[in-house]
Image (cartoon, rainbow, N blue to C red):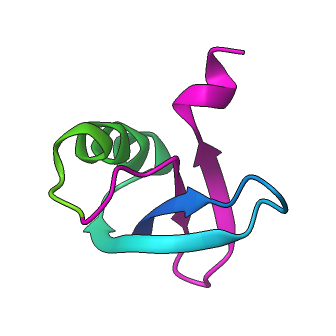
């Protein structure tokens, strides 16, 4: 199944997303894609450090979202 991993910044005032990068990932399941997304979050060369990552399925539906700031709160 094909997933899109999207890295983005959040504007603090209204939580608007600014996409920094999108990566296609062909995986057998969502869990594999989550592992890949978390790895890329720290290692992918992007113009800015992302605030969060989300994963979209092949239909473009959001199936996972994660932010290190939110998970530690």
Q: Is residue 5 above or below residue 29?
A: below
| Residue at horizontal 61 percent and vertical 82 percent from the top | 60
- Residue 38 visible, this orientation: yes
Question: With 49 as the anchor, is 47 left or right in this view?
Answer: left
Residue beneath the point at 65% across and 58% down: 63
Q: Choose top left, top right, bottom left or bottom right for residue 16.
A: bottom right
Residue farthest top in this picture: 72
Q: Is residue 1 visible?
A: no
Describe residue 29's horizontal placement relative to residue 39 as left or right.
Answer: right
Q: Does the magenta segment cover residue 24?
A: no
Residue shown at the point (25%, 38%) measured from the top left: 42
State the extent of the magenta-drawn residues as a range. Answer: 47-73
**Which of 41 and 1 lies nearest the eye of the viewer?**
41
Above or below residue 9? Residue 2 is below
User: Measured along the vertical axis of the image, is residue 63 above or below residue 34?
Assistant: below
Find the residue positioned furthest to the bottom.
59
The x, y position of residue 70, in whole percent, is 68, 28
Q: Position of residue 27 (x, y in %)?
A: 31, 59
Q: Is residue 40 left or right of residue 31?
A: left
Question: x and y percent of residue 28 in the render?
Answer: 35, 55
């Amino acid at each position: 199944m094909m997933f899109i991993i999207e890295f983005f910044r959040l504007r603090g005032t209204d939580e608007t997303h600014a996409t920094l990068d999108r990566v296609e990932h062909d995986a057998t399941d969502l869990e594999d894609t989550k592992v890949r997304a978390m790895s890329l979050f720290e290692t992918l060369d992007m113009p800015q450090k992302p605030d969060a990552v989300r994963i979209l399925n092949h239909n473009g539906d959001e199936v996972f979202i994660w932010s290190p700031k939110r998970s530690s709160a």
